[in-house]
Amino acid sequence: MQINGQEYRSVWFENSRVKMIDQNKLPFAFEIREYSSYIEVAAAIREMIVRGAPAIGASGAYGLALAALSAPQDKFRAYLRSARDELISTRPTAVDLSIGVNYVYENTLKFIPDLDHARQVALLAANEFANRSAAECLELGIIGASLIQDGYRILTHCNAGALATVDHGTALAAIRQAHKQGKNIFVYVDETRPRFQGARLTAFELEQEGIPHAIITDAASGFYFWKNEIDMVITGSDRICLNGDIANKIGTYEKAVMARAHKVPFYVAAPVSTFDFGCEKGEDIMIEIRDEKELKFCGEIPVANPNSIALNPAFDITPAAYITGIITPKGIFEPAEASQKVQA
Ligand code: MRU
């Protein structure tokens, strides 16, 4: 992605460290964090310095590579297993995280007892995972752009951009490509309470690329649907089930229902690492419940009645029936057939 005219990924490995753009600071400050231990990477994922399903998948993969590089000779296997468990436990909903971490874990274990080789393989596997993720997002963006017609007004939710992936994005990858093709498009950006991934991160990415957009409150999309000013909805996903149900940022389900009520197509874009081939249906997905402080405070400022409790599910489930199609690097598929098609 281009940030201030320079090319970046959201997360990468350089000089024996995992580096990532601090997404909690954007758009007000652009800061790069550097980590030399998997424990630090786990904390960065938990604190959402890096966030977005494919981006935490790659971060977890790099975190495990750091663990392999520093694992003691005599306890290599046990150390790696505990690092794997720690990294995967940081956030429960996005399946990309366990897929990225396990990819490095399984490839590394194959080379025990040659530990020098195993350590090298861990880093190679993490880089391979990240590169594949970025390539898939580019590809799905090109495929997804075919759905976007000149003049389209598109609603998106959360940040499904390059920041949320290794590069390019999911929903925003398609939007980026359509803009590059010269299509005249406009993006409605849901602010995405309580952490404002839309208002802060999606708006920032769109501005960097010169894509016309406006931030709206999460509750305002109904107004624009009612005015017939939304032509399509595209979101990302954190986990896609075998039956085509998907988990994504809280509020996604509402947008899908609203789109259906207004006969507007609702698309989900995702790389293969977002498919959970072991998960039958939405009810089987664990939804992350985050601290009520995220709702009751805006930064340090209290914005809610102090003695009330607040409920803060970070994701919701959109049933397959509300999804027009899933945009993947292998094509655009009906939700119920997407898992099978991406494995073919
Ligand atoms: O809590 P977050 O910010 O990690 O949630 C991210 C989302 O819900 C994105 O929409 C999702 O990861 C798909 S975008 C690649």
Image (tube, grey):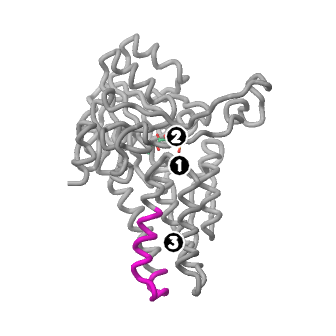
For label 3, the residue is 65
Under mark 2, the amino acid is Ile
Are there few (<14), some (14-19), or many (20+) residues within 10 Å of tag 2? many
| Of labels 3 and 2, the one closer to you | 2
Q: Nearer the viewer, residue 152 or 255?
A: 255
Q: Residue 92 carries which label?
A: 1
Q: Where is residue 251 in the image (x, y as percent from the top left)?
A: 50, 28
Q: Is mark 1 on a helix, strand or loop?
A: loop
Can you say whether 326 is above or below 323 in the image? Answer: below
Question: Nearest the camera: 168 or 249?
Answer: 249
Q: How far apart are marks 3 and 1 (CA)?
A: 20 Å
In the picture of the structure, the residue carrying the numbered disc 2 is 287
Label 3 and label 2: CA atoms lie apart by: 27 Å
- Label 3 is placed on what type of residue? Ala
- Please indicate, yes or no, whether residue 279 appears anywhere in the rendered image: yes
Residues under numbered marks 3 and 2 in contact, where contact means CB atoms less than 8 Å apart: no
Q: Do the residues labelled 2 and 1 touch (CB within 8 Å)?
A: yes
Q: Which of marks 3 and 1 is in front?
A: 1
Q: Residue at x 37, y 41 (%)?
A: 176
Q: What residue type is labelled 1?
A: Pro
Span highlighted in magenta in the image: 101-119
Callout 2: CB less than 8 Å from ligand 1: no
The secondary element bearing badge 3 is classed as helix
Answer above or below: position of 309 versus 315. above
The residue drawn where x is 36% and y is 24% is: 153
Q: Earlier in the sequence, mark 3 or mark 2?
A: 3
